[in-house]
């Protein structure tokens, strides 16, 4: 287990439950994560249904793959954190570096205190300025969320991890 001082605002993964399914989602998350990393920490955030997952170094890909091996009924998404910081432009641009130029899907979930301060259009403009085109049908995605004032992002290939669950395979 990690001590509280080992846990930064920027976790290895975040997992989000379906609405009103937090306790069941926590069980699914725990089973899947601890199977690959017995020293992981799963911390409920101040946001309802959002869990911060801290892993041992180098185990992110194994844990993400493990989520895709099972069908999770109570989880909405599991996002491996590629970039984390308080500079929106920098976080988005660095996340885009691993994606091939062309069409990508943009998935944005902002919470307080950034919800309302930054629009999806602002984020879209950054993505487009980097030479990408936005579509709803691409397998390649940029996911942007926030925890407190920090933007967190993932980029890669969308994979299913349950009937309503997606994750991102980093490329």
Image (cartoon, rainbow, N blue to C red):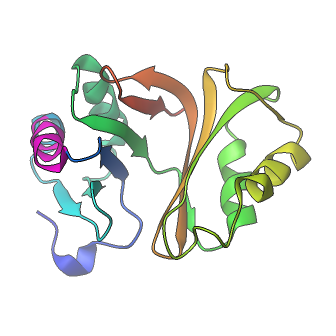
Q: Nearer the viewer, residue 85 or 77?
A: 77
Magenta range? 21-31
Image-quadrant location for residue 85 = bottom right
Q: Residue at x 67, y 21 (%)?
A: 138
Q: Which x, y percent locates residue 113? A: 52, 76
Residue that protrudes farthest toward the front in the picture: 20
In this picture, residue 119 sits left or right of residue 83: right
Q: Is residue 147 magenta?
A: no
Q: Which x, y percent locates residue 143? A: 57, 44
Q: Nearer the viewer, residue 111 or 150?
A: 111
Image-quadrant location for residue 51 = bottom left
Quadrant into which the C terminus falls: top right
Please, is residue 91 above or below residue 112 in the view?
A: above
Q: Residue at x 16, y 67 (%)?
A: 2
In this picture, residue 164 sits left or right of residue 134: left
- The image shows a total of numbered marks equal to 0
Residue that protrudes farthest toward the bottom in the picture: 5
Q: Which x, y percent locates residue 70? A: 21, 20
Quadrant into which the N terminus falls: bottom left
**Magenta stretch: dominant SS?**
helix
Q: Residue at x 20, y 63 (%)?
A: 43
Q: Residue at x 16, y 34 (%)?
A: 32
Q: Is residue 27 magenta?
A: yes
Q: Nearer the viewer, residue 6 or 151?
A: 151
Image-quadrant location for residue 33 = top left
Please, is residue 160 above or below residue 94 in the view?
A: above
């Amino acid at each position: 287990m990690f001590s509280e001082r080992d846990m930064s605002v920027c976790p290895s993964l975040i997992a989000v439950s379906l609405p009103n399914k937090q306790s069941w989602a926590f069980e699914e998350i725990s089973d899947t994560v601890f199977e690959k990393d017995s020293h992981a920490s799963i911390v409920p955030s101040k946001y309802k249904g959002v869990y911060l997952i801290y892993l041992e170094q180098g185990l992110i890909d194994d844990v993400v793959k493990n989520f895709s091996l099972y069908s999770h009924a109570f989880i909405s998404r599991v996002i491996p954190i590629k970039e984390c910081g308080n500079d929106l432009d920098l976080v988005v641009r660095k996340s885009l570096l691993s994606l091939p130029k062309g069409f990508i899907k943009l998935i944005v979930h902002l919470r307080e205190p950034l919800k309302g301060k930054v629009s999806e259009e602002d984020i879209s403009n950054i993505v487009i300025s980097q030479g990408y085109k936005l579509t709803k049908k691409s397998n390649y995605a940029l996911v942007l969320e926030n925890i407190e004032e920090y933007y967190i992002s993932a980029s890669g290939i969308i994979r299913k991890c349950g009937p309503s669950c997606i994750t991102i395979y980093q490329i």
